[in-house]
Amino acid sequence: LGPPIYTSQRLYDTTPPGVVMGLGWTPMGGVSMYVETIVKNILSSNSTPSLERTGQLGDVMKESSEISYSFSKSFLSKHFPNNKFFEHARLHMHCPEGSISKDGPSAGITMATSLLSLALDTPVPATTAMTGELTLTGKILRIGGLREKTVAAKLSGMKEILFPKSNLADWEQLPDYVKEGLTGVPVAWYDDVFKRVFSNIDAEKCNNLW
Amino acid sequence: LGPPIYTSQRLYDTTPPGVVMGLGWTPMGGVSMYVETIVKNILSSNSTPSLERTGQLGDVMKESSEISYSFSKSFLSKHFPNNKFFEHARLHMHCPEGSISKDGPSAGITMATSLLSLALDTPVPATTAMTGELTLTGKILRIGGLREKTVAAKLSGMKEILFPKSNLADWEQLPDYVKEGLTGVPVAWYDDVFKRVFSNIDAEKCNNLW
Amino acid sequence: LGPPIYTSQRLYDTTPPGVVMGLGWTPMGGVSMYVETIVKNILSSNSTPSLERTGQLGDVMKESSEISYSFSKSFLSKHFPNNKFFEHARLHMHCPEGSISKDGPSAGITMATSLLSLALDTPVPATTAMTGELTLTGKILRIGGLREKTVAAKLSGMKEILFPKSNLADWEQLPDYVKEGLTGVPVAWYDDVFKRVFSNIDAEKCNNLW
């Protein structure tokens, strides 16, 4: 109980697997916004998979989480066919802070990365933020508010920001003082995201993890 | 039936497992507010787990209870892997008083502590109150109204109040006469809460309880 | 059809198991108000338990019935562990009169007593009325309108009224002519209610009833 306060800060110095920083846009400016996913129960061979979501998510963002979930399952089964994580994991995805309503499709790649990070038991770099709408086939679509989101990423201490390649012209028009200290990474397909944030994984180990 | 009356007092001299004092904020000041959870049925190996909630909880507080439930399951399975409480327990969580509407995310750590207290069959100190939003990974987020909540904790006879470390500056600005007789404990992660309120548990026994 | 008429009288000369008189408060004064619960189907080992409610109950009163149901299950499993009533009984709880809207938490102990009366197949004294909010752990909380409720109890021919111990000061301030002929019994925990209304039960028999 109490008046809502948006801390809008970097909550994690190191991020555990399942935690990824996204970026939101509000009428008052950009905000950094984590997606965090955990496994609710110990994985067992007869547990039925599920995805619970909290964080006052609007309809579009709920659908976005479903798209990310389907995409992640499909991606994992293609690239790590022996990894059975999604066949058994009972997942809970939360977007702090719990009292702030959130909506829109631009956390798509962030949600997919949160899920895959958990499935591969591999954290993503704590200083990487990302924004982009995801389609079921892994195509990344243009988002709004790149300037505000870039400012928010910097205020939260990020070093790298992944954004849709179709927003490249917006990026190039940002003044240098806004981009200073930030590496911008345009991504057209989810493969581009994956290669960037999971560059050091042991594919053999990840394939036989669960 | 009758006009609602908020007693706002300390209801319990000793608290059974599952009962923890939280703190709320209202336009008229702070209030102490218990979270109490019980097991509805005797645990049996084939009972399916569930969590029922009452107490006129708003949407944010309902989500907060889900986050606390997922976190508690995950916490128990990591630290007490043989304790199968949450795999079978049919739980009911209630926030008296039943006619007062309540909302907001700041009872997160109180709810998680209520659930873990029950899972570990261990009461928490009856003179400890707590407030803090909980994320799925156990991070504790800033809350509002610390001053009013501190006053309410004192009026209810508390000796100790746990609050988010990110509210430390607010705590330090409180005048001494408000804090007198109260130990303030800043907590950044749920681990900090756990060590403080369950300091004397027998880990071996708790691991093999259910 | 026509304006609703509240009979406000004693409906039962002897009460069957499952029927208990509660007391309500309205702007026009107190009213006596039965809670009656029946078993819908013959108990069988594979019937799944349920609780249906009718009587134009508001949100708070519905939650109150859920609290009473959870508490009753928990109470029975602690004190009569072999009594499997709540594991199979399909129950229906009704608060006559069906066209009068009712709300508030103060029928908590009345509802729990109705359910336990049925589970123990034991009627409660027909001249005992009761009022009190119940928490999940069996604590009984303060209610409003004790004066009006006491008058209603007398008008309905009651000899005894159970009320929350935290209302004791209100009781003591009532003029003698209001209390005349009524025994007031302050109750702090549900145990106090149980000992008063089920004083003559055969514990061994009740434990092996179903």
Image (cartoon, coloured by chain):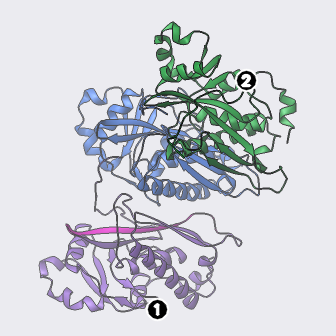
Chain colours: A purple, B blue, C green
The image's mark for residue C125 is 2
The magenta segment is A27-43
A30 inside magenta stretch: yes
Camera-side residue of B187 and C181: C181
Left or right of C98, for residue B131 = left
Left or right of B183, for residue A205 = right
Determine the residue located farthest toward the front in the rendered image: C1
Residue drawn 54% across the image and 29% down it:
C31
Q: Position of residue B130 (x, y in %)?
A: 42, 41
Residue B122 is drawn in which quadrant?
A: top right
Do callouts 2 and 1 point to residues on the same chain? Answer: no
Q: Is residue A62 above or below residue A100?
A: below
Q: Residues within 10 Å of mark 1 (few under 14, many from 20)?
A: few
Q: Residues within 10 Å of mark 2 (few under 14, many from 20)?
A: many
Residue drawn 79% across the image and 39% down it:
C81
- Inter-mark Cα distance, 2 to 1: 70 Å
Camera-side residue of A59 and B118: A59
Q: Position of residue A191 (x, y in %)?
A: 43, 90
The residue that mark 1 highlights is A137
Dot 2 falls on a residue whose secondary structure is loop
Camera-side residue of A107 and C189: C189
Q: Is residue B86 above or below residue B101?
A: below
Q: Position of residue A82 (x, y in %)?
A: 64, 85
Is residue C186 in sight in this rendering? no
